[in-house]
Each structure stands twice: as structure tokens, then as C-alpha cells.
Image (cartoon, grey):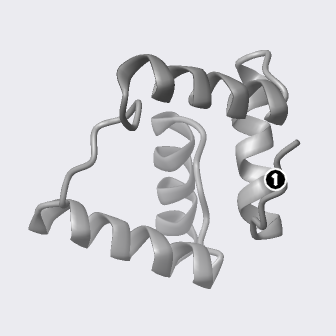
Amino acid sequence: MLHIRIEDDLREDAAAVFSSLGLSMSEAVRLFLHRAVASQGLPLELKVPNAATRSALREAREMRKARRARFATPEALVADLNTRENSD
């Protein structure tokens, strides 16, 4: 048995991702561990983000903190922009 400490919001976000893939949290962790053993390393590519990626990550964190609007589709974004433009 494995016990790990994870922030609540990270656990919830990860559970949603795994659920959309048809996996439970336990199945996803088990899959990760099997892949790590098979590859004899981390089953993912680790990179230092470039300046553009760091900027995008910083902006995303700020948006999340500020609870700015998010859009599921480009059309929803355009509709929101049009609504804001018409209300000015």
C-alpha cells in the first residue's frame, strides 16, 4: 500500500483527468509505476521551460488566482468578447 500527501485541488484535478480517461486514481498511479519500471526511469519527458512557456505558465497561474473567465471553445471566447464590446 502506498500513502502520499497531495494538495486537495491537485488530487481533484488529477482525478477528473483520470476519470475522463476511464481510470481511477489508483489505476493511474499503478500505470505510472509500471511504466517507470519498464523504462527504468520516469515515464515522461522533463524539460526546463523556455521563456515563452514560463510566461504562459505565469499568466495561467495569475488567471487562476484572479478567477478570470475561462472558455471551453474559441467560439465562447469570441462571444464573450463581443458581449463585452457591446456593453461598453
Does dot 1 land on a helix, a strand or a loop? helix
Image quadrant assignment for residue 84: bottom right
Q: Which one is in front, 6 or 4?
A: 4
Q: Is residue 71 above or below residue 70?
A: above
**Coordinates of residue 60 in the picture (x, y in percent):** 44, 68
Q: Which one is in front, 64 or 10?
A: 10
Point 48% across, 58% down: residue = 81
**Coordinates of residue 72 in the picture (x, y in percent):** 60, 39
Q: Work out which quarter of the rendered image holds the N terminus and state it.
A: top right
Point 84% across, 55% down: residue = 3
Point 36% across, 34% down: residue = 41
Image quadrant assignment for residue 24: top right
Asked whether, in this view, residue 18 is left or right of residue 54, the answer is right
Asked whether, in this view, residue 15 is left or right of residue 64, the answer is right
**Coordinates of residue 77 in the picture (x, y in percent):** 50, 48
Q: Residues within 10 Å of mark 1 (few under 14, many from 20)?
A: few
Identify residue type, mark 1.
Answer: Glu
Residue placed under numbered mark 1 in the picture: 12
Point 46% across, 46% down: residue = 78
**Coordinates of residue 37 in the picture (x, y in percent):** 49, 24
Count of labels in the image? 1
Q: Residue furthest left?
A: 51
Q: Which one is in front, 40 or 49?
A: 40
Q: Is residue 50 above or below residue 58?
A: above
